[in-house]
Image: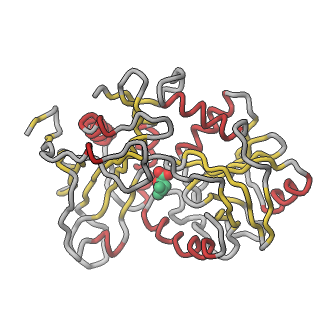
Amino acid sequence: MIATETISIQKTKNSRLSEVDFNNLSFGSIISDHMLVSDYANGEWGPSKIVPFGHISISPTMLALHYGQVVFEGMKAFKLKDGNISIFRVEKHYDRFCKSMERMCIPHMSFEHFDEALKALVKLDAAWVPANEGCSLYLRPFVFASEERFGVKVADEYKFIIFGGPVGPYYSAPLKVKVEDRYIRAAHGGTGFAKCSGNYGGAFYPTSLARKEGFDQVIWTDGSPELNMEESGTMNVMFLLNNILVTPPISDSILDGVTRDSFITLAKEMGYKVEERKVSAKELIAGFENGTFKEAFGTGTAAVVAPIQTISIKGTNYKLPEVKDDNVSLKIKQRLLEIRMGLKPDTNKWNTIVKP
Ligand code: COI
């Protein structure tokens, strides 16, 4: 055992690193050698420890399995050109993690606890951060109610875990999406803004129906007769209408996407006009019909940018112009990539540097 300031480290004796084909990474199947664990009990978060990645033992009565107190983050670490590693927008992810935890009655965690944990894990598994363009080490901090009982209550015990895995591109081709007009993802006053697991589980059924109809994803709406756009699948959604980048405003039913926020910042810096406002199905149809609707895309940590090619609204498929390298979405994506890989100055101070 090696002790850092507060985090104990038990290194694996059987690294799996040599088994990984870094030129052929898919999303979500490969996990790095270690994970970080800390427990909440008796009213406080205990020290973090890093151990070899592996199974954890749980009781069938563990409260998270029954009543759903589970929240997570999706983050990324990148290899910089100088060989160091950057973790992208730790503060913004932490802020959202706290808001999600508060909504789900999960006890607060200090920034130092979250930040030190991430940095220690990334430092130890630095060799797992891919260097190839478009690849990264995806980090999954999550917390769940670990108390063992089946009475309905806010848990008194929780587990915080971070693991990571090298990932490549999430979507390989432009998407065909359906504006979902029967099911909704979130309602005002609900948990839509929180990154809680139930939001994802609840989205599976409508998405699987859309997949059977030949779509890759759905665009969620606010459920109003106007069908105002909310999110696309697991991403925020943006539209280029009349040369203005338009995106639905953050609300209690929309996730405050870190990539969304980064895109808005970079788009403005690059001279594009951005509007955060409601976008109805009627406005999109008018844009298709008069040719002013040029691009649609999803933004998210996993996907980064997912260009949308076809949007189905109330049974009619509308096609956008073919996705090209000079699309606004891809130009902003390129700028983001360059900042994250240390090829352009990090003027917004988004990168937390970890020296391997
Ligand atoms: C992300 O984009 O990081 C997400 O959390 C979405 C999905 C992979 C669950």
Q: Residue furthest bottom?
A: 151
Residue 258, horizontal then vertical, whole percent: 52, 43
Mark count: 0
Instruction: Judge whether 173 appears above or below 334 on screen.
Output: below
Q: What residue is at 60 percent from the left and 33 percent from the top?
A: 334
Confirm whether residue 90 shows in the render. yes
For the point 44% across and 59% down, the residue is 103
Task: Please indicate whether residue 127 sits to the left or right of residue 251 in the image.
Answer: left
Q: Who's the residue at 33% across and 47% down the image?
A: 164
Inspect this view and state whether residue 44 appears: no
Q: Position of residue 168 (x, y in %)?
A: 46, 46
Q: Taking 196 as reference, is 86 above or below it?
A: above
347 with respect to 157 (left or right): right
Quadrant for the C terminus in the image: top left
**Residue 227 occupies which quadrant of the picture?**
bottom right
Residue 6 in picture, x, y percent from top left: 16, 37
Q: Which residue is located at x 31 percent, y 40 percent? A: 128
Q: Position of residue 86 (x, y in %)?
A: 40, 31
* Residue at the outermost right position: 290
Q: Residue furthest left?
A: 1
Which residue is more in the foreground, 90 or 344? 344
Query: Looking at the image, which is closer to me, 274 or 336?
Result: 336
Residue nearer the viewer, 257 or 163: 163
Q: How is the image coloured?
A: secondary structure
Up-down relation of residue 47 to residue 201 (above or below): above
Q: Quadrant of the N terminus?
A: top left
